[in-house]
Structure formats: C-alpha cells, structure tokens
Image (cartoon, coloured by chain):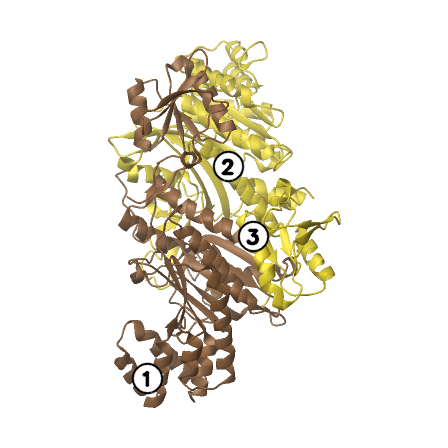
Chain colours: A yellow, B brown
C-alpha cells in the first residue's frame, strides 16, 4: 500500500493534537454535568425523509447504500445526520414517555455534510450541543440557563491557566424584538418580514446604503421604515440599562408593539442575568442585527465569534424554538446552543501549532537495565499506576542515554531508574535533577501528571 | 410528526443507560492512559478500495452517496469503516514520519456494518481498541503488554465495588504453535493447513466425531493425524507449568517442530506473565482450539467470553500481526485487542436492567421558594458547582413536596432549601435527614457525588 493521503474535509489529529481536543471535550462535559445536563448519544443515521423534512437539501446529506443493495433508489433509506438537533428532536419524541421534563441534555458527536470543504467547514466535524426541552411549556429562565452554562464552558476553555483558547464574544438577540419592531413599523407579517430579515442579514457583507436600497427595491418598504430597520440593526451593547444600554436606544427609535416589549424585556433580562459571568475573555453583547437567517427560532438567538478568528463566522449558535418537536398532541419547546468543536480547534491547531506538551499520556518512563529485569521495571510501573501515575516501561534495554532520548522525543518529563537493591532513582530530564525515590510514595507535581496544552 | 420507532440494529440508550456506557468508556480510557497509550480518533470513512482490499465483502460496508451525486457508480468512492484496524493501519502509514515507535494507541469509536441485525450484532456499535505498533520490528514482550493492559481494564470493569460487570474469560493461543504442530504432523502448509484450521474452528458447533470425519474427507489427512489435531484442540489450561499445564500436555502428543517450540514458548511466557493479574473474575486460559478463523494473525491470538453470556461469542478479540501495514519499504508489525463495548453493554442493559441510579448528573436539587428568589437559589448552585458538586435549580416554585418528588423521579439524592437569612438546609431525601448547611463548605459523601451503576 502506497503512503495514503488525507481526504479533503475529513480532518484528523496527531496524538498530541487529539489530547487538546480531548481536554476541550472533557471541560465541556464537566461543565455541562455540573449544571445537571445528562449526556446522550444518538445513532449516526436518520431516515432520509426526516433529514430532508423541511425540503432543505442545502445540508448536503450523505445517503447510505449497502454494498449489495439493489434498491431502485440506490440507497438504504437512511443518511448520516448533519446536525445534532434533528436526531435530538426525534429522540425526544421516541422516548418522551421515559424522559423527565424539563429534559436537559448535552451531546458531543460527529456530524457529516457533503459540502465543498473550505476554511472552517468540514465534511466530518464534532459538535457539542446543550438543550433544555419542556413538555408543552418551557419558562424563559431556561434561556438564561443555557446561556450561563455555555458562558461558563467558554470561560473555562479560554482560561489562560488551562487551555488558553482565544476569547469568545457571544452575540445575543431576540426574534420577538425584531418581529415586534417590524410589526410596529407596519411591515407585513410573513413574507415581507422574512424578506427584511434576509436583507438585514447581509449587513456583514454589504454596506448599509446598499442594504437600504435593497430594502426598498426587494422588500418594498418605505425609506423612513428602512432607516429605522437599519438603525435597530446597528445597535450593539454589552449592557441593557443606562444611556449606553440597548433598551433606551431601542425605545428612542419610537416604535411601539406588544411583541417588541416582550422581546426587549427578555433580551434585557438575559443580558442582566449573565453579567456576573462575563469578563474580557468572554463577553456577551446584545447585537440587534443577529437573526439566525430564516431559521426556526422564535425568541432568543445566539451567535458567537472567536477573537482573532472572526472569518470563521459563528462558531457557537442557537436559540429558542417554541416547537422543537411535536407529535400532534404534545409540543416540546426548547432552547439550546451548539458549539462547533472542530470548527474552533482545527483552524487553531493549524495556525498556532496548538498541541499538548507530550505525545503520550505517560508522566514517567521506567528505564530497563537489561531484558531479564523487565519484571522489576514492570513492578515499578505497576506501583506508580496503582496511584494514578501514567507510565510506560522502556521498549529495549538500550544505553540509559538512549532511553532518556526516547523519553525526550515523546515529552515524558521523568525517567525512573530501578535499582537491584533498595529504592530507585527518578530524574526530571528537563532540569537534570535526580533523586532517590520509592514507587510506593513518589508522585510528580500535579502539573506534570497529565499532558498540558502548549502554544507553539 | 408521528411517534418515531427505533431503527433495527442501531441501539440507542436512555440517559441513565448512557451513564453506564460513559463510565465503562471512562474506565477503559483511564486504564489505557495509565499504561501510556495515546488516544486517537480516525475519520469515519475510508476509500472503498481500502475497505474492500482483501476482496472480503462479508463486512457489509456502507457506501456513502451525496444527495445530488450523479456519479456512474452511484457513490462517493468512500464508505463507513467496519472496524478500527483498517483505519488505524492507514493512519500509521499516513503519519509514520510524525509518530514515535513503538506507537501505543487506544481508540474508542463507532463502527458500522450493514449486516442483518441479530442478538449481539449491530449495524452501529462502539469498539475500544488498543494496539502497539513497531517499525520493522516489535519484540514479543508487547504481546504480554497488551494482554496485561486489557486484563487490567477488564478487572476494573468487573469489580463489584464499581461497575460490577460479569466476569471475563480471556482465551489465548498462538498461531505458530498450531502451524508448527500441523507442520510437525506433516500437514501441508497453505491450503491444507487452512482447511484443518477452518474445520477445527467448528468444534464449538459440531461434535468432535463429526469434525474428525470432515478432517479426513475435506482436509484429506489421515486418521492418526486427525486424532492428534483434535487432541491438541481440546487442551485448555489456566497454567503453563506442571502436570495440568498445557506445555507438558502438548509435549505428550509427541510432535516436534521448530515453530511449535517457538509458539509454545511464547504462549507459556504470556500465561506466566499475566498470572499475577488474574482472579476468579478475570481468568486467562490457554485454549488451543482458538485460531481466529482465517484472519491475518501470525502469533498470539485472543478471544474473550463474558461469563453467563457465552452465546454472544467473543466480545474481545485480537492478536499479533507481523504486518499491520506496509508501504513497500517499511513494515509495521503490531499486536492489539478490540473490546466490543456495545456488544457487551447492549445485551446486559436489555437483560439485567443495568442503569445508573440517577437519570441526571445532579447530586443536589436546589429548591425554589418563589420565582423572585431564583437568583438566591442560583447562587447556592453556583457555590456548589465551584466545588465540583453537580446540581440543578428547581424549574418552578411549586410546593416543596412537589419539588422533592421532582428530585425523587430523577434519583437526585439531596434537596437544598435556601433560607433568606443565614445558611440553608439540606435534606437527604432517601433517609429524610435534614441538616443546616453552608453551600461554601457542605459536600455529599463521595459515593453520592456521581451517579452509581445499579443492577435492577
């Protein structure tokens, strides 16, 4: 077999890079579980009619075909999931009688999209989703809850003392606010409102004057209305209250509508309720241009930018949906956020050399004096492992200098030299310091116990 | 959407069942890392020609087709991997220049096979693989190493104090021993040896006399040869040495061959070297009937039975391959074992009701006096989480009795009652005991911190 080459759009990591991804997933899982979210996994496949339910084929679904399949359609009727929301909605309906509501779940899994690979877009990638789902109703305080949980997780990921990822800017808005504002301006519900939202969404690509023009020509609204639509979309604020707060600035636009009041009140509550968790590293900004396109969100909406990597687009998005799922009799409203784990990590690894400081979990290499004494070295390793210290025994009884270089190449910080009589010696190969030590009591400093993430 | 029904062959777990699977995977990961194995993941797909390289289409590969694909073949040229060995071999070749050898890796991932679903066989299932791979050479002591690592992992899984899975019986043999024995008997190398192995493999389904008959009629060997072939295959022993040991019993059959000596010596070394780890729960048995069919193994071979679930067949298999991969110039020998995580857990869950004692990670439900005091309850929850105690705040300010039942239904052991002044009170709802407590210092007993696995 000739040397194989990578498949475009299917990123793979080296062991020292996978250690970073694993630590990110560990931090997410720990945070989600501290907040009472239960982890589930769903199967990788769904019936094709479910994957294409909304007639939306833009997700570029991968259909599955068995090798010997002779069906007329040329597939098995199943395809790979392209997100974790469609399978989760199906899981909730399928297991509704066995779940307790409100149901909090997290889910970290791979998803697949057959789209053209490009920067930050992959054909296989890992997402980490949290959602809270209610039966028939789900109070607004759960919107605050999922925001707090994700902000807590992002804080831990960007903590310089641990993983040290770049900072995050969570952008929040509320669909009721936008829809109420438009309704108060006299924009017709339905098609005209959708058109206005679609055009406002272009503000990050087109200049405001151009969008203004399009609002007149394509959405058929009057110039003063377009002025106020654009004035709303330019409001950005990290606080709800006071002169710089977004509440007053929206009020100043002079539009009145019950739905606007409701949405503005929700957004203000959300921003006030997460203020104690925000910092320079993780900011929460009310950004009144965010609408999440024509998605199924009905209240709170989220997008997130990674500091210094704004070209990746939103790497953590979500919102409130009044009907995540329904079986006709019961409706399950939900609110959730999805973090693009691969979307953040793969470019960071490629551009910054982000990796663990070891290629292996071992904190100690137990040296080997000669092949006959392998059981003695194994016994030292066993004593260290029994106390939770990852280690490995040297593969051959080469000269000690060579064994030390073996450890160095892998980033293993300590080499243990067993001795025929009495305790052994352990050497920190970074400093050269060597001390007598007993495998039943010696421990490395906590920092050396596990691989640490380093920025090359 | 009507209530969806499960897809046959794609098992999914409820949250309290997924907690068991997650704990099993955590135990495996911890054990593998303690032994210095690095975790990697490979993409879910491989080029179809690699998946079908050995002309073996029995794995029922799933091919991928993009929705809008119009290729003549009706697929993308890629398919889902059916095991973790083919992708690992490709990963080693692709990254050979960036890996350190001997390379120890573990890999816990889903694999897919389009076969007919039946007991213990799934279309999507999780495997946990460990392998050690060398460049050009890999000393035999790594065969001992992977055995010890997997025995260590199985001991932890079957420990009644933690997960309490049933016991495991690891069956080991050596292909050199069998091939040397057959060669010493005058069985021709190649086709005739393969035929004899194939027929001996039927011993678990057919009576010995029938296999004897087939050895004569289909493998064309003489009756005295068939006698000794069957005599070898019936040897089972937990010790190498002494009268009951397999070494003497093989010798007593009076066959001489260099390869037999080598294989017998390796098998004896293996069994002696794991003796200190075995117990009633995890036994290692030399079983001279095990040959792993016509697979690519060249020395040590493993199979494993789960006590009380023998009908599942081998749930943990592997062995030594002198050429895991080769690029023509360099050969990469390896030795590894693969544990069928789903294959063990899904039947256990179905038949014994194996599940965690909670449906959620929360150890504490923080009660809510009224909606206005939600921030006070959140603040208690925040203080508990800061010290690693998973908790959730009650969703509504219902009567306390109702909030306690909310906790009961989820298996949450503690309910915290915040008080307007001074410390709160915490109630163990299993015993009814209620005490004053400060969220900055109170902790539950370690046993209550995480969900525990219980056997219904």
Frontmost of labels 2 and 1 is 1
Q: Nearer the viewer, residue A161 or A167?
A: A161
Q: Specify whether A63 is left or right of B402.
A: right
Q: Which residue is mark 1?
A: B215
Using the rendered image, report if marks 3 and 1 lie on a common chain: no
User: In the picture, residue B328 is in which quadrant?
Assistant: bottom right
Q: Residues within 10 Å of mark 2 (few under 14, many from 20)?
A: many
Residue A19 rendering spot, x and y as whole percentages: 58, 47
Q: Nearer the viewer, residue A197 or B245?
A: B245
Examine the rendered structure and indicate whether residue B443 appears above or below residue B240: above
Frontmost of labels 3 and 1 is 3
Examine the rendered structure and indicate whether residue A192 appears above or below residue B316: above
Q: Which residue is mark 3?
A: A383
Secondary structure at numbered mark 3: helix
Chain to which the residue tagged by mark 2 belongs: A
Q: Specify whether A196 is left or right of A359.
A: left
Frontmost of labels 3 and 2 is 3
Q: Which residue is mark 2?
A: A28
Examine the rendered structure and indicate whether residue A290 appears above or below residue B49: above
Q: Residues within 10 Å of mark 3 (few under 14, many from 20)?
A: some
Q: Nearer the viewer, residue A422 or A369?
A: A422
Q: Nearer the viewer, residue A2 or B89?
A: B89
Residue for point 42% across, 75% down: B246
- Determine contact: label 3, label 2, CB under 8 Å: no
Q: How far, Cα to Cα, is label 2 from label 1?
A: 58 Å
Q: How many marks?
A: 3
């Amino acid at each position: 077999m000739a040397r194989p080459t990578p498949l475009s759009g299917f990123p793979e990591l080296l062991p020292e890079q996978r250690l970073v991804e694993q630590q990110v997933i560990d931090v997410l899982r720990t945070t989600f579980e501290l907040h009472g979210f239960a982890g589930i996994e769903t199967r990788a496949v769904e019936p094709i009619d479910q994957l294409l339910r909304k007639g939306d084929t833009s997700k570029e679904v991968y259909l599955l075909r068995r090798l010997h399949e002779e069906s007329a359609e040329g597939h098995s009727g199943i395809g790979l999931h392209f997100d974790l929301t469609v399978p989760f909605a199906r899981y909730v309906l399928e297991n509704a009688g066995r779940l307790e509501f409100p149901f909090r779940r997290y889910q970290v899994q791979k998803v697949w999209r057959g789209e053209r690979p490009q920067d930050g877009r992959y054909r296989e990638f890992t997402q980490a989703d949290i959602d809270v789902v209610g039966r028939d109703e789900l109070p607004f305080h759960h919107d605050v809850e999922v925001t707090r949980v994700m902000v807590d997780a992002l804080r831990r990921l960007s903590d310089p003392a641990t993983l040290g990822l770049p900072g995050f800017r969570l952008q929040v808005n509320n669909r009721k606010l936008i829809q109420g504002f438009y309704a108060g301006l006299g924009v017709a519900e339905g098609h005209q409102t959708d058109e206005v939202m679609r055009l406002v969404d272009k503000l990050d690509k087109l200049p405001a004057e151009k969008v203004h023009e399009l609002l007149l020509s394509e959405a058929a609204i009057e110039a003063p209305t377009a002025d106020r639509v654009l004035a709303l979309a330019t409001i950005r604020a990290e606080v709800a209250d006071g002169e710089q707060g977004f509440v007053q600035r929206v009020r100043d636009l002079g539009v009145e509508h019950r739905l606007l009041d409701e949405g503005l009140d929700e957004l203000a509550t959300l921003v006030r309720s997460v203020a104690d968790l925000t910092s320079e590293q993780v900011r929460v900004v009310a950004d009144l241009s965010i609408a999440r396109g024509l998605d199924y969100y009905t209240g709170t909406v989220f997008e997130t930018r990674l500091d210094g990597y704004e070209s990746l687009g939103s790497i953590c998005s979500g919102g409130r949906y009044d009907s995540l799922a329904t079986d006709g009799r019961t409706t399950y409203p939900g609110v959730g956020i999805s973090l693009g784990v691969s979307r953040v990590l793969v470019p960071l690894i490629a551009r910054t050399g982000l990796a663990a400081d070891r290629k292996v979990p071992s904190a100690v290499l137990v040296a080997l004096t000669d092949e006959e004494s392998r059981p003695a070295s194994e016994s030292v390793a066993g004593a260290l492992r029994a106390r939770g210290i990852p280690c490995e025994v040297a593969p051959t009884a080469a000269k000690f200098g060579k064994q030390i270089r073996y450890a160095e190449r892998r980033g293993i910080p300590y080499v243990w030299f067993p001795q025929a009589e009495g305790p052994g010696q352990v050497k920190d190969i970074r400093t050269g310091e060597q001390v007598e030590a007993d495998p039943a009591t010696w421990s490395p400093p906590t920092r050396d116990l596990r691989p640490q993430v380093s920025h090359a």
